[in-house]
């Protein structure tokens, strides 16, 4: 005859049992601890601010990275300074792109769109893809790296964007939950 004691009972955590989600996205229950949700939200806001701030500084020449006489609204090019100074394996490509109107517009629209999407917590998948592409181009423009054989802030920020999109971070300290309820977004999940 087999008897059972309290030693045979598995130890439970203090929280409720929650099954692991098959995939993160619409309809996925939140299983992350509250502290992590806030950290993801704050990380999203901080990264969004870096994109939005770059847009504002380049547009208005606020004197941080862009002097006032180089402001985009005063006829300056937001890409000339960086791309014309590229040296390395992609020097010719980036030097040719420096200061071209379509590159200036694409770059600035990207900075604004990615920054706003991250700050608001909406369109995270599109923002992540666009941000990773932009950061990959900036990474290629910075080769060869001065301080590390292969890793710099462009790659780490790209990884952050991927994490933020995969964890539905727009739901935390953002409008992501409301955004996900919009019928168009529910129908086209890539808009999440």
Image: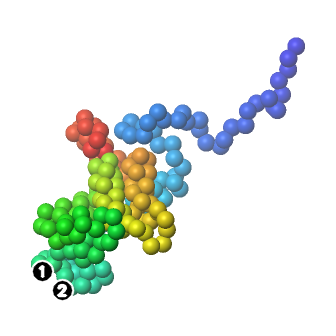
Q: Is residue 84 left or right of residue 124?
A: left
Q: Judge whether 183 appears above or below 45 on screen.
A: above
Q: Position of residue 173 (x, y in %)?
A: 39, 57
- On the image, numbered disc 1 is attached to which residue? 74
Q: Position of residue 107 (x, y in %)?
A: 22, 64
Work out which residue is located at the far right of the displayed protein and give it.
1
Which disc is residue 69 wearing? 2
Q: Position of residue 137 (x, y in %)?
A: 31, 60
Q: Are marks 2 and 1 in contact (CB under 8 Å)?
A: yes
Q: Is residue 118 left or right of residue 37?
A: left
Hey, which quadrant is residue 140 in on the image? bottom left
First reached walking from the N terminus: tag 2 or tag 1: 2
The crowding category of the residue bearing disc 2, from other C-alpha atoms within 10 Å (few below 14, some 14 to 19, many at least 20), is: some
Q: How is the image coloured?
A: rainbow
Judge whether residue 189 can be spotted in this image.
yes
Given residues 185 and 139, the one toward you in this image is: 139
Q: CA distance from mark 2 to mark 1?
A: 7 Å
For the point 82% across and 32% down, which residue is it? Answer: 7
Q: Is residue 5 left or right of residue 154?
A: right
Q: Judge whether 31 appears above or below 81 on screen.
A: above
Judge whether residue 41 can be spotted in this image.
no
């Amino acid at each position: 005859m087999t008897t059972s004691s309290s030693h045979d009972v598995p130890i439970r955590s203090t929280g409720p049992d929650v099954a692991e989600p098959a995939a993160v996205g619409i309809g996925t229950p939140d299983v992350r601890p509250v502290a992590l949700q806030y950290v993801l939200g704050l990380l999203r806001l901080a990264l969004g601010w870096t994109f939005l701030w770059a847009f504002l500084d380049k547009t208005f020449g606020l004197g941080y990275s862009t002097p006032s006489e180089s402001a985009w609204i005063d006829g300056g090019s937001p890409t000339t300074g960086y791309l014309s100074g590229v040296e390395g394996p992609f020097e010719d490509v980036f030097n040719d792109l420096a200061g071209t109107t379509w590159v200036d517009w694409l770059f600035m629209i990207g900075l604004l769109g990615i920054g706003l999407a991250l700050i608001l917590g909406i369109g995270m998948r599109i923002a992540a893809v666009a941000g990773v592409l932009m950061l990959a181009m900036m990474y290629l423009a910075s080769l060869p790296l001065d301080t590390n054989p292969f890793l710099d802030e462009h790659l780490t920020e790209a990884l952050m964007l991927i994490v933020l999109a995969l964890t539905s971070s727009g739901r935390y300290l953002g409008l992501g939950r409301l955004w996900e309820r919009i019928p168009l977004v529910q129908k086209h999940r890539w808009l999440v």
